Amino acid sequence: MAKRILITGAAGFLGSHLSDRFIKEGFEVIGMDNLITGDMKNIAHLLNHQNFEFFNYDVTQFVHVRGELDYILHFASPASPIDYLKIPIQTLKVGSLGIWHLLGLAKEKNARILIASTSEVYGDPLVHPQTEDYYGNVNTICPRGVYDEAKRFQESMTMAYHRFHGVDTRIARIFNTYGPRMRLNDGRVIPAFIGQALRGQDLTVFGDGSQTRSFCYVDDQVEGIYRLLLSDYTDPVNIGNPDEITIKDFAEEIIKLTNTTQKIIYEPLPADDPMQRQPDITRAKEILGWEPKVSRQEGMKITYEYFKGLTEEELFKSEH
Ligand code: NAD
Ligand code: UDP
């Protein structure tokens, strides 16, 4: 019998790639998404697959799934700063009511649940690179706090269900991940820069561009999540690529990659934008035997090809 897995946020960037992977591994996949930031286009190729079912559903409501369930991946949540600043209450609800419903479902079905946590639990970190035992530096009341605190609550709730109800849980702390199917206008730095390059606009670096990020290609991320789900490790695990770069240097790399003549222009740094971010992945290496394989050069080439394939209408459509 094929194993059954529920993936929330299945029509989003990571959820759709995870759905592909679990289908490929022979699982029966139940995708669930309310499409608030997702797009059916990301899973259109799966809709007629005999092992894929999709429910347009908001997981902040009571979640019920018919039949047996072996695994749950809780990936539903706005994930880009401009998304969660636009829909702050939904972000808090999916990280609180959403996880409560999904942990309840895991308990009822005796299913293992993995939650998508984030490097944002470390906030603007005072420890570098970030190890899992760092508690973080989060401003609870800043606009960005809605995402960070929802994810921190989500981790606490998950550990409480694990300790109190014996639910089998996994926590992935995901660092900036990119690749095909990111939304061009989601405001995250990679689609923002590539979109600007393709439209012939200057690249907007926020602040002086000295802040750093470490970008992980989606296939590596999916492999890390897959291994963590099938492991027996219940403490949080960082999944990301430690290859760190400043945002200014990254903008210059994109100008080279896209072979454009655009300039870099500087705009104000958003409130509480973390100054540096780099995962310490010692734990993932030791426990999962995992480390990223795709270099930023390779991953960005694939991602650029994807965005080049979008229609003019998609490229110039504005969401804001
Ligand atoms: P995404 O916006 O592409 O996908 C999120 C999906 O969740 C969307 O399809 C959206 O419609 C759905 N969703 C949101 N609220 C919902 C609700 N109440 N009910 C049902 N569906 C809902 O973002 P993504 O980059 O694929 O992120 C997926 C998950 O991974 C999120 O939980 C995010 O916090 C986490 N994460 C992502 C990154 C990254 O770099 N991509 C980094 C850290 C954590
Ligand atoms: N950023 C930027 N220009 C943009 C979009 C983002 O300079 O057009 C910066 C942003 O301020 C942050 C970094 O790029 O320092 C990564 O931003 P993103 O929204 O991708 O992710 P996060 O801040 O959540 O890591």
Image (cartoon, rainbow, N blue to C red):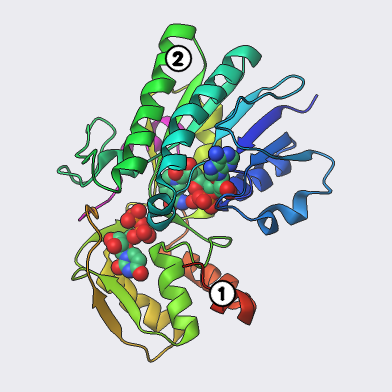
Residue 162's label in the rendered image is 2
Between 38 and 177, the one lying in front of the other is 38
Give the quadrant of the N terminus.
Answer: top right
In the image, 193: left or right of 310? Answer: left
Residue nearer the viewer, 115 or 254: 115
State how many labels appear.
2
Image spot of residue 140 (x, y percent): 24, 38
In the rendered image, residue 117, in percent from the top left (x then y), is placed at 41, 37
Task: Decide whether residue 279 is among the magenta residues.
Answer: yes
Q: Residues within 10 Å of mark 1 (few under 14, many from 20)?
A: few
At 69% from the left and 59% from the top, the residue drawn is 41
Residue 106, relative to residue 17: is it above or below? above
- Circles 2 and 1, Cβ within 8 Å, touching? The answer is no
Position of 101 with respect to 252 (left or right) is right
> Which circle, 2 or 1, is nearer the viewer?
1
For badge 1, the amino acid type reads Lys
Decide if residue 221 is in sight here: no
Please tell me which of labels 2 and 1 falls first in the chain.
2
**Which residue type carries mark 2?**
His
Q: Horizontally, is 213 left or right of 26 in the view?
A: left
Which residue lies under the disc numbered 1? 317
Residue 146 coordinates in the image, percent (x, y): 34, 41
Foreground residue among 80 and 242: 80
Distance, label 2 to label 1, CA atoms, is 44 Å
SS under mark 2: helix
Above or below, comparing residue 32 to residue 247 in the picture: above
Residue at position x 49%, y 82% in the image = 198
Mark 2: give few (<14), some (14-19) or many (20+) Cα within 10 Å.
some
Specify the segment rendered in magenta. Answer: 275-290
Question: Residue at the bottom extreme?
Answer: 261
